[in-house]
Image (cartoon, rainbow, N blue to C red):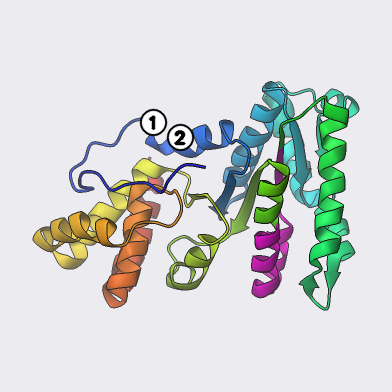
Amino acid sequence: MTKPMEPSGHLSHKKADSREHRDWDRLLTDAGPSDHVVQLYQDQDFLNRAVCRFAAAALQNGEGIILVPTVKHWDSFRPRLIAEGIDVEAAQKRGQLTIVDADQTLPRFMQNKMPDSPVFLGLAADVIARARNGGRFPKVRWWGEMVNILWERGDVAASMQLEDLFDQLAHKHDIAIFCSFMMDNFNGEIHTRMLPRLGENHSHLIPVEDYARLERAVADALRDTVGPDEARVLESELLSRYPATYNMPRPQALLLALRQVLPTVSDSVLERCGKLYGADSANR
């Protein structure tokens, strides 16, 4: 697991690296043992592309891959994997690709609306052992959405407890874990409550699809809200005093640091940032 991203340079007037919007692609391709990556998404296409990149890379690298989707989402993932040249049926037959139904599995370890730790860890260990296929696939990756099912139901405590258990699982069994939440990255409550909590049990955050577009939006929103001079001061000071607790794009870390130091200003910046990010997308 890598260390949190260190601040370097300013956001304002910075020419975005042409690869920046694909950093999440590289992260998912190269995910290794004990990495625990979380994605925030709001549209099915972004979810499809991220999950299929994670899965396709595992299959191409000779790793085992466990997917725990709802039926609806598997019906979206499968044709995309096939379009990317993956023989899904063959991968399942040789035991390299394991599909587990999220809606059917979740009730098996829930007790009194909370995850039963021993039951979950036992079930998950069995799935991982089968995915390793007697040592044929020693490296294993896991993507699932049971945590998001709980989140969308409003069972936040249960969702976060399950994430804690997945973090234990990643380290105990030396696997890479990737999960996805349907969350709006430009929502103030998400920044106040959920993103700091996710930092307790994740190594990396994928907050949006396009990192370069996020950088432009954050720089412009900060400048529009506090003025160019104050924006430069904040950019240089915030991250050095409030470093991110897990890896994320630098502009995202700046937003979270601003939330800790100047929450009132943060609300205005975040609202403006969301509008700019959306407008930038619409103009492309």
- The magenta region covers 141-165
Q: Which mark is residue 22?
A: 2
**Is 283 on the left or on the right of 141, as rendered?**
left
The number of discs equals 2
Where residue 218 sits in the image (x, y, percent)? 29, 55
Q: Secondary structure at mark 2?
A: helix
**Is 259 on the left or on the right of 174, as rendered?**
left
**Is 247 on the left or on the right of 123, as rendered?**
left
Q: Is residue 162 in view from this perspective? A: yes
Residue 204 in magenta stretch: no
Where residue 159 sits in the image (x, y, percent)? 68, 67
Where residue 53 sits in the image (x, y, percent)? 62, 33
Q: Nearer the viewer, residue 73 or 6?
A: 6
The amino acid type, in three-letter code, at marker 2 is Arg
Question: Dot 1 corresponds to which residue?
Answer: 19
The amino acid type, in three-letter code, at marker 1 is Arg
Please identify the quarter of the rendering in which residue 157 is found. bottom right
Going by the picture, which residue comes out furthest to the left? Answer: 229
- In the image, residue 21 sits, relative to residue 113, either above or below, namely above
Q: Please say if the residues under marks 1 and 2 sit with CB atoms less than 8 Å apart.
A: yes
